[in-house]
Image (cartoon, grey):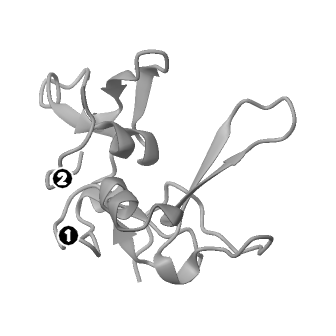
Amino acid sequence: LSPVCLGSLRRAASINAEYMGQWVHLVCALWIPETFVESLARMEPVKGLQNIKKERSMLTCIFCKKRGPCIQCMDSNCIRSFHPICAFRHNSRMMITTNGKLGDMSVKLKPYCEDHIPKPGQKRKVSVLGSVNAR
């Protein structure tokens, strides 16, 4: 998804011929809300590329300064955007994962810019994951 960084790549599968056979970063596929991996056991193929919002593809990464599908800080007052793999490489604490309630096997993904990484026990007003904030 991010055209600028090397990482653990997976083959994309799509109903749209434009994306079929492309290679994408696994980290990006997991963190960009519109994409997913079909098999969690094999962690491939990546699907949903055709669903990436146009606005998301126009965002510029605060680290590499290149355009491409980015995610944004979860803080409701922040519009900083970054490629998931760039954020992991810069400061992995920006990419927070939390478990659901007891018995819930889901994992919640919460990206934050460095200025808004929650301190332990701190609650933050967050924006809706998946939305593309522009101000």
Structural crowding at the residue carrying mark 2, measured as other residues with C-alpha within 10 Å and reported as few (<14), some (14–19) or many (≥20): few
Secondary structure of the residue carrying tag 2 is loop
Q: Position of residue 7 (x, y in %)?
A: 24, 43
User: Visible in this render: residue 134?
Assistant: yes
Q: Amino acid at mark 2?
A: Cys
Residue under numbered circle 1: 64
First in residue order: circle 1 vs circle 2: 2
Q: Which residue occupies the extreme right position in the image?
A: 102
From the viewer's perspective, is 36 left or right of 11? Answer: right
- In the image, is residue 68 above or below residue 112? above
- In the image, is residue 87 above or below residue 40? below
Quarter placement of the C terminus: bottom left
Secondary structure of the residue carrying tag 1 is loop
Q: Are marks 1 and 2 in contact (CB under 8 Å)?
A: yes
Name which residue lies at 37% across and 63% down.
87
Name which residue lies at 59% across and 76% down.
76
| Residue 7: mark | none
Name which residue lies at 40% across and 23% down.
43
Quarter placement of the N terminus: top left
Residue under numbered circle 2: 5
Total labels: the figure holds 2
